[in-house]
Amino acid sequence: MRTTTLFNDNWIFSEGFGNDALTAMRAGEAVRLPHNAVDLPFNYFDEKCYQRAFTYQKVITWQPEFEGREVSVVFDGAMADAEVFLNGEPVIAHKDGYTPFEARLTGRLKQGDNLLTVKIDGSENPEIPPFGGRIDYLTYAGIYRDAWLKITTPVSIRHAKIETQDTLSAAKGVTVRVDLCNPAERTLSGTLHVTLKDGEKVIASTSQPVSAVRQTFAFSGLTGLSLWEPENPQLYTAEIRLETEAGTDELSATFGFRTAEFTVEGFKLNGKLLKIRGLNRHQAWPYSGYAMGRRAQERDAEILKNDLKCNLVRTSHYPQSPWFLDHCDRIGLLVFEEIPGWQHIGGDEWKAESVRNVERMITRDWNHPSIILWGVRINESQDSHDFYAETNRVARETDPTRQTGGVRFITESEFLEDVYTMNDFYLGSEEMPGANHSRTPLRDQQVCTGLPTKVPYMVTEFNGHMYPTKRHDQEQRQAEHVTRHLQVLNAMYGDRSISGAIGWCAFDYNTHKDFGSGDRICHHGVMDMFREPKFAAFAYASQCEPDDGVILKPVTFWARGERNIGGIMPLIVLTNCDEVEFVYGPHLRKRVGPDRETYPHLPHPPVVIDRRHFSAQELGSWGMAWEDGEIIGYIDGKPVASVTFAGGAVPTRLEVAADEETLPAATKDQLRIVVRALDQMGNLLPFLDEPVSVHVNGPARILGPATLVLSGGSSGFWLESTGGTGPVEVTVSSPRFASQTIRVTAV
Ligand code: GAL
């Protein structure tokens, strides 16, 4: 039987490169994977600090079970340019930082101890995508994903590719293509069994004698099965069993039944039109870069789906963690996945590597029902006919079931893909020197494509650098940030030929000096790096239906003098309620409905309260008392949500909130904890920028410094397991508030 066990513990990490002996090991530091070679400060750092070579070493002691079997170490991802050695001898090299690779150790392992060495080079090698130009994100060095020790029979199952047929019919079909791995080129014999299952229940099963390294199994007439849909992401498994004289090998793969098609009328999931409302995501976190564990990856998917109410995420600009994608399958979040790259196209070897990235990405991920489109261009690069003809050819050949896209920002670019995927940063460009157009959220697709007819089309980025906004920026700027996201979403909803729009971006991210606010952060997220929402987060969230969550978010800090000239009007209330009641002081009340005039196409236009509803006098002016307030949301005439505001906010308590009550301990994983300074109404104190100290008691540590400064009234950190199980007490103290202790359990 196959064993695939995590191979994350007991690595020795050292600076520079040496593989000859155990010297590095003696000098190195014991680490667990996923590992970040250089932890960065939150902001203001020199990104060159990780752009150099590092060595990871680990002793593999001979085990009797290796005898007569295939033994390999699988790396889910290492950044970048990895070379693996066993006992000083080269085994495999892998340039790409985002796709997996397997070091085959069979025949090389000796009795006793063996030294496995992995050299990784974090420098921006211009021979490897995405490097060679400048990129607006960081590629943190390290073996930053899981590693696995895999032991199989000499002939084993390489992978399975599952396709569905008659997907929308009552009687469905499935084909399972099984590829075998036969590195020693043995004569093939034995039997392959494929069983389709719904949980533990067998749906269908079939067998074939082993005759070739590639065999296909077809099932038809399968009834009583459910589609994979965002609201009900039903998954099934295919269990593959290979029986040979040398033993049995098993592999199971998850799949779903769904059709996905971008058309000139929009995107259709399972034959039904679905407007795509998405955000771009970098797989990056403060301090630890890319090196976050399974649960932290999954949590990001949950934030996008459950908090931001998006139906799609774009994995900008590279294949992301398998844990993240698995979770997208489970929770019903659509994915647009793309190859690594950013604007720059390198030479012939670079392009060849990029084409290989297409194949590796698709082969790794072809069974994910959540993935509906492959991005096979270097994000925002210029046209390059032969290169992109080839990436498209390879994508279509590797996976004929999905369409291709390729993200560009140039107009009239050569359309070699199935979907014209366009970064439309037109909104805001009217302010550019020499511009002679008025403010327009999105351009007509044919203005961008230059094509005589409409084609399948999606907007893959907007806003971002056109309007960077921090969570603690002035209220007025944040209201404009919100407005810009709403305007693009409204334009997208109003144009049938636009399949959807994917905003730039979900979370603020660390970047190179050539981008961002000079602090090595692009403050482009609708959430900050701790995944705390800016107001713009609710521009997305409020588009969900109330049965998926009632959203009521007034875009205000509720103060007389925060905006220019003063007051809080026009007040945008991001909500999916039918109407809201605005209450100011003891006497003034007014019900206002959604602003359908300005946002006719949004599923849930915001309520905008302004001079049409109140005179300036009614709200008083500079020199008059500032009152308490309340915003109440109504659905079907009934109050369903409310937010109260204090006319005189005073610091009242620290909120310390963990995402979950448990922290996985068997693996290196992280749990997010957010600290918020709240007033007497439970609202954030947005300018209370004071320090808090965190003390952890139990088998966990905090990532980043133990003293944090609240910014925009809050801050956060990730708690990381240190291996043991049991209670973990986290105490947050501050000069201003009573300290707070929360308890979670490392399990
Ligand atoms: C785009 C690019 C993104 C990011 C964004 C900022 O041009 O594709 O990676 O840099 O701009 O708005």
Image: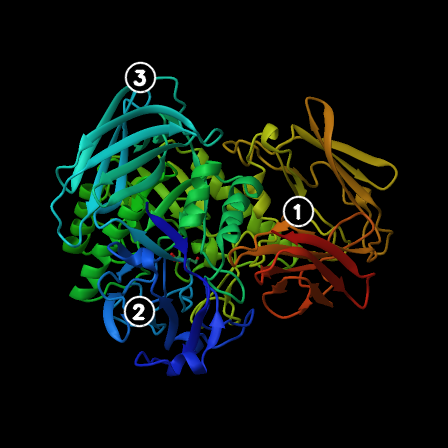
Give the Cα distance between marks 3 and 1: 50 Å
Task: Tell me the amino acid under the disc marked 3.
Answer: Ala
What residue would you read off at disc 1?
Answer: 555
Comparing 684 with 243, the one in front is 243
Callout 3–callout 1 Cβ contact below 8 Å = no
In this figure, which residue is indicated by the disc labeled 2? Answer: 133
Relative to 13, residue 685 above or below? above
Direction from residue 683 to residue 12 in the image, left or right: left
Q: Secondary structure at mark 1?
A: loop
* Residue 673: percent from left, percent from top: 65, 56
Residue 393: image tag: none
Which quadrant does the N terminus fall into? top left
Give the CA distance from mark 1 to mark 2.
Answer: 39 Å
| The disc label shown at residue 171, or none | 3
Could you tell me which secondary element the residue under label 2 belongs to?
loop
| Crowding at mark 1 (Cα within 10 Å: few <14, some 14-19, many 20+) | many
